[in-house]
Amino acid sequence: MLAAYHEAFGPELAAMIRSVPARPGPGRNAVRILDVACGDATYARLWSEQLGVASEIVALDLSRAWLASAAEQIVDRPIALCQAKVDALPFADGAFDVAWCPQSLYSLPDMQACLNEMVRVVRSEGIVALVENDELHHILLPWPIDVELHLRAAEWKAFRQQHGPPSRFYVGRWLTRLLRTAGLRHVRERCYASVRQQPLTPPTSKYLTEYLRALRARVTPHLKPRMARRLAELADPDHRRFLLRRPDLTVICLDRLVTGVKP
Ligand SMILES: C[S@@+](CC[C@H](N)C(=O)[O-])C[C@H]1O[C@@H](n2cnc3c(N)ncnc32)[C@H](O)[C@@H]1O
């Protein structure tokens, strides 16, 4: 699903990276980037493609499985891989010019502690950049309004039941506050709206079909039977009411990029 997402929204993700003013520290030619919780290192690769030889990139993740898939992705790129926890980064203070953490903060154990670690390993005047979204306003589809209101309320209940306080799934709306609390200055937010219409490309179709499947599985136990039936039709690729079949379909994906500068 993540791979399909990267492919579906690749141009916008690359634009996010281009918008981060990454500069080498004093007396150096290469920009030092830390890709925090890198997953399959798609972003580390995009950084490498953008900066070329003028970069020293480390992609870090806790999971061996993700790092194995990252190793395949960066085989022809001079990117170092590192297995470590975000809340105990194995780097000296000020070691990087940019700490880049996309679509991961919400999944980390103590978000503020992890953010503080990112700030620690960035040099003075360096940048911490986060990409996150807010489940209420991430994938905008032309749902019947009553279905959408019920399913978002059910999703909140599902998150709460499975994960405790659900606020981390809506973290996009609090990113600027988190960065300020971590002591960063010049905190700036940009929103990237990726708009897709018919015909959907295969990666976009794959991502959205999987998104709808996962959403339906998550919320159905928290919906009344009639609403669950309506959602089942709208999210079922084999049903004539399947949302993604609509000839007039417009899908908007909202991602927030928030950056802050270390004093
Ligand atoms: C949703 S994935 C996003 C990966 C990548 N940033 C991307 O957008 O493609 C979240 C990643 O966080 C990693 N992760 C979760 N907890 C972590 C921790 N405490 N320290 C380091 N990585 C962690 C997972 O292994 C996973 O690769």
Image (tube, rainbow, N blue to C red):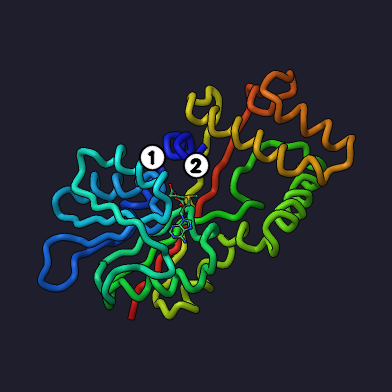
User: Circle 2 — which element?
Assistant: strand
Distance Cα–Cα, label 2 vs label 1: 9 Å
Task: Tell me the quarter of the picture where residue 91 sits.
Answer: bottom left
Determine whether, in the image, residue 194 is placed left or right of residue 139.
Answer: left
Tag 2: amino acid: Ser
User: Which residue ends up furthest to the front in the rendered image?
Assistant: 64
Q: Residue at x 48, y 29 (%)?
A: 203
Task: Tell me the quarter of the picture where residue 162 sits.
Answer: bottom right
Where in the figure is residue 89, as x and y percent of width and height? 35, 68
Asked if the residue at tag 1 contacts the one at tag 2, i.e. Cβ–Cβ closer than 8 Å, the answer is yes
Q: Which residue is mark 2?
A: 194
Task: Tell which of 87 and 159 is nearer to you.
Answer: 87
- How would you rate the neighbour count of disc 1 (Cα within 10 Å): few for under 14, some for 14-19, many for 20 or more? few
Residue 14 visible at all:
no
Where in the figure is residue 252, as x and y percent of width and height? 57, 41
Task: Tell which of 94 and 180 is nearer to you.
Answer: 94
Position of 13 relative to 105 (above/below)? above
Determine whether, in the image, residue 199 is placed left or right of residue 68.
Answer: right
Task: Tell me the quarter of the picture where residue 76 sits.
Answer: top left
Q: Which residue is mark 1?
A: 11
Where in the figure is residue 123, as x and y percent of width and height? 27, 74
Q: Residue at x 43, y 75 (%)?
A: 116
